[in-house]
Image (cartoon, rainbow, N blue to C red):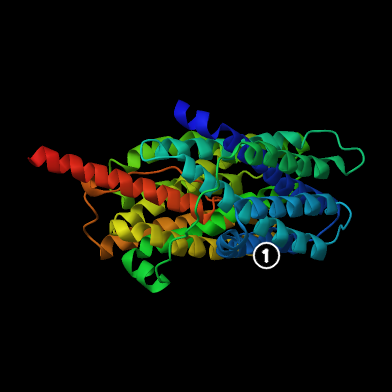
């Protein structure tokens, strides 16, 4: 880990500042949208727009990088992010915010692709897993820190919009001033969706459902908290608890996943997350119960992302793992676009508690489908033959997923070499 920090500290610091800016603007819009009397459905469209842009950026950013280079893409997209963040309080209407969120999502996706390719270039076979862990840690830390900034006094109504713009602008300084020569960029050609679904129906269905769960957390948690009348301090703690749960439980779940049938773990983790969501649904008016629900939902749903990728890899040849990442991200992105829209509709029909009901339905559906798949594919991959779990956050770009896939491949090849030496 010391080697990773020594070689990538500037990149990791810059990414943390970017996550502070991104995490703050998402929560802030949820709160200020309520103050501006936007309807729940209007806010759901605003929040969904981010994932439309993010999915588009993940598809187009690699080509942009190949045409004009990492540094130009990084600087241009960063400038757009800062500009949009400052325009939010000036153009306070749902259409402007929706357009802004599409641009923000597109730009952040491109920035992540660029930064993560630099991270991969600075890592090697010995420390790639540690680099992924450090990257996930700074992502989570940035989002949690962002929630604390919601408590900064903002009498003018502009300061909290300016702060994320400042953090995003500052993020580029350590990255651009310290990065060594830019890496070559060559995204893997994705598998067809038909091939991917045939290979792992549970992995694909899970990524789709999980896209809805994550986007509801990232986009609608602040909207829910505002509608139920939580104070700014309570909103900050509530949203932070989701990501603290994700950070605390990521490694225990990953450790367990390498030692048991992953289908059973997917079923158990999904069901536990659904129970956590039902706690929030039933005890919406009791703040401590909301924190318990937030911790369980975040702690169960976020590790599921990496768990589903690892499970899908168990049925792929080494040469197909990187190719599968594009399809998995696309499926997850479609679910993420739909998530806030359906959440907003449910919150409009049954009230704010629809937020938790939507999350519960998706997680219980994943658990049920996992149980069904166990009846269709009776023999799962033997534990000794499974790929290693690598921590990765759902907001990561295709490059981070491909980095994780490289780690899976390298670990699998090392295990095969050790087995061959043992047999000799």
The residue shown at (40%, 61%) is 324
Q: Toward which corner of the image does residue 65 lie, by quadrant? A: bottom right
Relative to 277, does residue 375 appear above or below in the rendering? below
Q: Is residue 69 left or right of residue 207?
A: right
Number of on-image labels: 1
| Quadrant containing the N terminus in the rendered view | top left
Q: Toward which corner of the image does residue 204 lie, by quadrant? A: bottom left
The x and y percentages for residue 116 are: 53, 47
Viewer-closest of 15 and 309: 15
Residue at the far front in the pictured view:
181
The x and y percentages for residue 96 are: 82, 63
Residue at the far bottom in the pictured view:
194
Query: What residue is disc 1 on?
Result: 345
Q: Is residue 10 left or right of residue 194?
A: right
The residue shown at (77%, 44%) is 165
Residue at the far top in the pictured view:
2
Q: Is residue 256 left or right of residue 183?
A: left
Q: Is residue 350 visible?
A: no
Viewer-closest of 38 and 329: 329
Q: Is residue 181 left or right of residue 312?
A: right
Helix, strand or loop for disc 1: helix
The x and y percentages for residue 41 are: 73, 64
The x and y percentages for residue 283 are: 62, 43
The residue shown at (72%, 43%) is 168
Viewer-closest of 130 and 263: 130
Around disc 1, counting alpha carbons within 10 Å, would you say few (fewer than 14), some (14 to 19), or many (20 or more)? some
The residue shown at (32%, 49%) is 409
């Amino acid at each position: 880990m010391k080697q990773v920090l020594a070689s990538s500290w500037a990149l990791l610091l810059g990414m943390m500042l970017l996550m502070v800016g991104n995490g703050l603007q998402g929560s802030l819009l949820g709160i200020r949208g309520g103050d501006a009397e936007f309807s729940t459905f209007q806010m759901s469209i605003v929040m969904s727009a981010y994932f439309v842009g993010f999915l588009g950026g993940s598809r187009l950013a690699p080509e942009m990088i190949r045409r004009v280079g990492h540094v130009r893409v990084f600087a241009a997209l960063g400038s757009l992010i800062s500009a949009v963040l400052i325009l939010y309080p000036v153009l306070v209407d749902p259409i402007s915010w929706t357009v802004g969120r599409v641009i923000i999502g597109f730009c952040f996706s491109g920035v992540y692709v660029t930064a993560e390719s630099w991270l991969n270039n600075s890592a090697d076979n010995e420390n790639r897993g540690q680099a992924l862990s450090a990257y996930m840690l700074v992502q989570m830390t940035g989002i949690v820190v962002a929630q604390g900034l919601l408590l900064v006094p903002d009498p003018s109504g502009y300061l909290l919009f300016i702060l994320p713009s400042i953090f995003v602008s500052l993020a580029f300084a350590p990255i651009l001033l310290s990065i060594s020569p830019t890496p070559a960029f060559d995204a893997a050609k994705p598998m067809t969706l038909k091939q991917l679904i045939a290979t792992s129906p549970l992995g694909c269905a899970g990524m789709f459902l999980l896209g809805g769960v994550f986007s509801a957390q990232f986009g609608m948690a602040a909207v829910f908290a505002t509608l139920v009348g939580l104070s700014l301090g309570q909103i900050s703690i509530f949203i932070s608890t989701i990501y603290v749960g994700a950070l605390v439980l990521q490694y225990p779940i990953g450790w367990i996943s390498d030692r048991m049938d992953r289908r059973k773990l997917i079923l158990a983790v999904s069901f536990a997350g659904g129970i956590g969501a039902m706690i929030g649904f039933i005890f919406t008016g009791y703040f401590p119960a909301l924190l318990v629900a937030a911790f369980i939902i975040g702690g169960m749903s976020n590790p599921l992302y990496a768990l589903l990728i690892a499970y899908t890899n168990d049925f792929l040849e080494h040469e197909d793992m990187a190719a599968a990442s594009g399809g998995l991200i696309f499926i997850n992105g479609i679910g993420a676009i739909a998530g806030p829209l359906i959440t907003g509709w449910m919150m409009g029909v049954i009230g704010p508690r629809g937020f938790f009901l939507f999350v519960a339905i998706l997680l219980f559906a994943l658990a049920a489908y996992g149980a069904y798949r166990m009846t269709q594919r009776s023999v799962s991959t033997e534990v000794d033959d499974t790929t290693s779990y690598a921590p990765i956050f759902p907001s990561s770009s295709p490059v981070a997923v491909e980095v994780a896939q490289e780690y899976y491949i390298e670990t699998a090849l090392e295990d095969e070499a050790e087995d061959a030496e043992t047999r000799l």
